Image: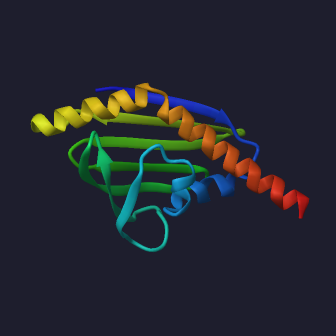
């Protein structure tokens, strides 16, 4: 399966970018996938935490267990395991948000179908749209703070 990357310039504060990435409630502002949080350790994603997300993918209800490897210093790194496994990395470097998603082949017919669907979804530009939305949200919050 594929590896997908995106990048966008971020004018907002680095801490705000990480807040947007780790707050499940904020994800609806930028995530290309519609999902609900079924379980989470704490209120947000943190290094070493776990969460379970559920949502529709290719017309099927699926659940993914998230294992968060790192959520600090401008970086979010996690693995989403379900019918498809995805390694997800976001990193803020010198005012630029870089994202990478590696889609691993799923097991069985359903897993292969959903892996292909995830690749197709990412190939259609949804990762770039998500990164751009994070940059816009972080900048909007920064502009509100300056105006206040």
Task: In the displayed orientation, state which residue is furthest to the left.
Answer: 108
The residue located at (54%, 32%) in the rendering is 128
- Residue 115 at x, y = what percent? 25, 34
Q: Is residue 7 left or right of residue 111?
A: right
Q: To which quarter of the image does residue 36 belong? A: bottom left
Q: To which quarter of the image does residue 48 belong? A: bottom left
Task: In the displayed orientation, state which residue is furthest to the front.
Answer: 59
User: Quadrant location of the N terminus?
Assistant: top left
The residue located at (52%, 37%) in the rendering is 99
Q: Is residue 88 above or below residue 118?
A: below
- Residue 58 at x, y = what percent? 28, 39
Q: Is residue 109 left or right of residue 117?
A: left
Visible residue check, residue 21? no
The residue located at (40%, 50%) in the rendering is 78
Task: In the displayed orientation, state which residue is furthest to the right.
Answer: 147
User: Quadrant location of the C terminus?
Assistant: bottom right
């Amino acid at each position: 399966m594929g590896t997908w990357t995106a990048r966008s310039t971020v004018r907002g504060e680095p801490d705000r970018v990480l807040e947007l990435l780790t707050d499940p409630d904020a994800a609806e502002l930028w995530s290309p996938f519609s999902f609900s949080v079924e379980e989470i350790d704490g209120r947000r994603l943190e290094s070493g935490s776990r969460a379970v997300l559920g949502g529709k993918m290719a017309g099927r209800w699926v659940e993914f267990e998230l294992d968060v490897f790192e959520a600090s210093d401008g970086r979010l790194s996690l693995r989403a395991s379900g019918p498809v496994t995805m390694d997800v990395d976001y990193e803020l470097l010198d005012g630029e948000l870089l994202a990478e998603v590696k889609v691993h082949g799923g097991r069985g017919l359903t897993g292969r179908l959903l892996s292909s669907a995830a690749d197709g979804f990412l190939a259609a530009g949804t990762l770039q749209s998500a990164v751009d939305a994070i940059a816009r949200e972080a900048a909007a919050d920064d502009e509100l703070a300056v105006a206040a």
